[in-house]
Image (cartoon, rainbow, N blue to C red):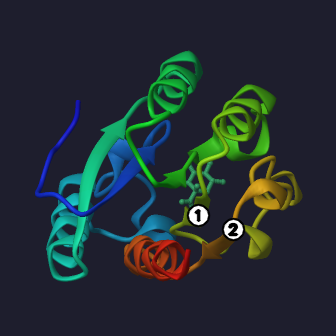
Amino acid sequence: MFTESSEKLSILVIHGPNLNMLGIREPGIYGSVTLEGINRLLNERAGSLPVTLSIIQSNHEGVIVDCIQDSLGKYQGILINAGAYTHTSIAIRDALSAVKIPVVEVHLSNIYKRERFRHHSYIADIAVGQISGFGANSYILGLEALHHYLSQD
Ligand code: DQA
């Protein structure tokens, strides 16, 4: 599912697996804001930057890889919370490396304060940067950081 806004810098926002469950899913870790709420906040912030967002959520690794491949020539930046695929997916990393579109990685929780298996990200070292631990605000900070980075080019 894609959500379009206006023109300017075009950024693709990718939400990975289980993020459609936000609001219900472990609110003590991920907060009570729903994915719809996060997307609303992102679109509000995008409008004032100004940036055009396309937003997709998928629970499927191959769908995320397809979206990244399809983003070539369409988007100047990618904001991604790959969820658990952050820690497992060489395929998502390779797709991001292939399209060479600047990426900012975000996480609601601080992955370094959690289980050891969450400490490694396959995306972090090919990303412009990572924002982790600020709840829904991680996305807003990530969008601002990506916009700032792209505006310097
Ligand atoms: C997450 C952290 C991941 O470890 C986890 O698998 C998620 C969400 C976060 O936003 O904090 O699904 O990416």
Residue density around tag 2, few if under 14, some if 14–19, many if 20 or more, within 10 Å: some
Q: CA distance from mark 1 to mark 2?
A: 6 Å
* Left or right, 21 with reference to 122: left
Q: Looking at the image, which residue is at 44% across and 36% down? A: 73
The picture places residue 120, in percent across and down from the top left corner, at 86, 55
The picture places residue 98, in percent across and down from the top left corner, at 71, 32
Q: Quadrant of the C terminus?
A: bottom right
Query: In the image shown, does 20 or 89 lie closer to the viewer?
Result: 89
How many labels sit on residues? 2
* Vertical side of 6 occupied by 137: above or below: below
Which element carries disc 1, helix, strand or loop?
Answer: strand
Q: Which residue is mark 2?
A: 128
The picture places residue 52, in percent across and down from the top left corner, at 23, 58
Q: Which residue is mark 1?
A: 104
Q: Quadrant of the N terminus?
A: top left
Q: Looking at the image, which residue is at 45% across and 76% down? A: 135
Q: Looking at the image, which residue is at 11% across and 58% down? A: 6
Quadrant containing ligand 1: bottom right
Q: Amino acid at mark 1?
A: Val
Residue density around tag 1, few if under 14, some if 14–19, many if 20 or more, within 10 Å: many
Q: Amino acid at mark 2?
A: Val
User: Which residue is outermost to the front?
Assistant: 153
The picture places residue 70, in percent across and down from the top left corner, at 45, 25
Q: Is mark 1 within 8 Å of ligand 1?
A: no
* Left or right, 128 with reference to 42: right
Q: Quadrant of residue 37?
A: bottom left
Marks 1 and 2: CB-CB under 8 Å? yes
Which element carries disc 2, helix, strand or loop?
Answer: loop
